[in-house]
Image (cartoon, rainbow, N blue to C red):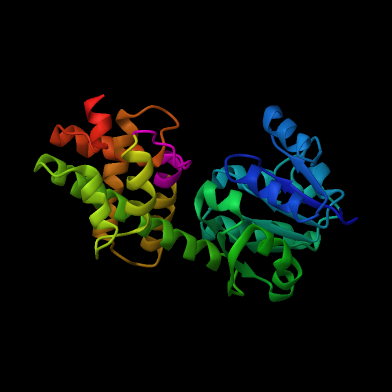
Amino acid sequence: MSGAPLGFVGLGAMGAPMVRRLLAAGNRVLAHDTNPAALSVAVSRGAEARGSAAAVAAEAETVLVSLPTPSAVRAVALGPGGLVEGRAMRVYVDLSTTGARVAREVAEGLAPRGVLALDAPVSGGVAGAEAGTLSVMAAGDPAAFERVRPILEALGSNTVFVGEAVGQGQTLKLVNNLLAATTWAAGCEAMAMGVKAGLDPELMVRVLNASSGRSFPTERFAAGPVLSRRFDFGFRMELMAKDMRLALEEAEALGLVMPTCGAARTLYGLALAQGAPGADVTELVRVTEGWAGVEVAARGRNEA
C-alpha cells in the first residue's frame, strides 16, 4: 500500500464497498464509523480503525465521507470531534447526497483551516459501489479535483467535474435522484395497472425494458427485486424520500414549480407511513399493489 493514507468516514451500505475498492487499489485507508461492527468488518479487509473523525483528519490529508443525512455530514465535518479538528486534512470529499446548501456550509466551515472541499455525490447504488462503476459528480476547486481524481476513478467508471462552485455536484445528483424517484413512482402505478388487467408481470416488465417505457427503475428495480419479491436493491426508501425533499426544496429556492415530482413525493410519504422502518425503495410498489388488489410478482411466486 502507498504510504500517504486516505481517510474515510461512514461505512454503511455505500461506504463499506467504496472502502474495499480503495483498499483493492493499493491505498492505505484510515476509517471511522459510529457502528463498531461496520468498523470491524472494514479492519478485517485491511483498513485501519480510528476512534473519531477528528483522529482520521489528524493523519490523512485527503478525507472522504459517505453519510446518510445532511445532519450527519454537518456533525462529522464541523461538530465536536469532527474533521474540522484534524490538522492534517487538506482536501475534504463528500460522497453523500446532502444538497447544495449543506455542501456550501461545510466548505465555508472548513476553509479557515485551509481545507478545500469537494462535493462529489455518487450514483449507481450498492452494486455500482461494489463493482467500482459509480457515476461521480464532483464540484469545487479544480486543483483539488485533479488531486483526488485517481481516488474517485477507483470508485467510479464515470467521474465528471461538474463545476467550480461547491454544491453543483449535489444539485446534479438531486436532479438525477428526483428523476429516478418520480419515474419509479409512475412505474409502480403502471405495473399495477397491467397486472390488474391480466398481464403476466414478467412479460410486461420484459417488454417495457425493450420499449420506450424502459428506465433505470424498470430495469433494476422491477426486473429483479420486485418480480422476485426480494425487495433488495439496497437503497432505503427513506433516503430516496430525503433526496426528493432536498431536491424540491432547492427547486423552490430557485422559484420553480414541479407538480409532477411533487405528486410522486406524496406516494413515497404514503409508503413510509405504512411501511416498516428501513424498507427498500423497491417496496414502493406495495402501495399501488394495495390500491389495485394485485401483486407484481413472477408467476411462480404468485402460485407459491
- Residue 181 shows in this picture: no
Task: Between residue 68 and residue 54, name the one nearer to us.
Answer: 68
**Vertical placement of residue 170 versus 302, above or below:** below
On the image, the x and y values in percent for residue 213 come to 24, 61
On the image, the x and y values in percent for residue 132 come to 61, 56
Q: Main secondary structure of the magenta part?
A: loop
- Is residue 231 one of those drawn in magenta? yes
Q: Is residue 200 left or right of residue 215?
A: left
Q: Which residues are magenta?
A: 229-241
Task: Determine the image quadrant of residue 210.
Answer: bottom left
Q: Is residue 6 left or right of residue 203?
A: right
- Residue 121 shows in this picture: yes
Residue sitting at the far left: 197
Task: Between residue 190 and residue 111, name the one nearer to us.
Answer: 190
Task: Between residue 229 and residue 166, name the one nearer to us.
Answer: 229
Task: Determine the image quadrant of residue 228.
Answer: top left
Task: Determine the image quadrant of residue 67.
Answer: top right
- Is residue 109 one of those drawn in magenta? no
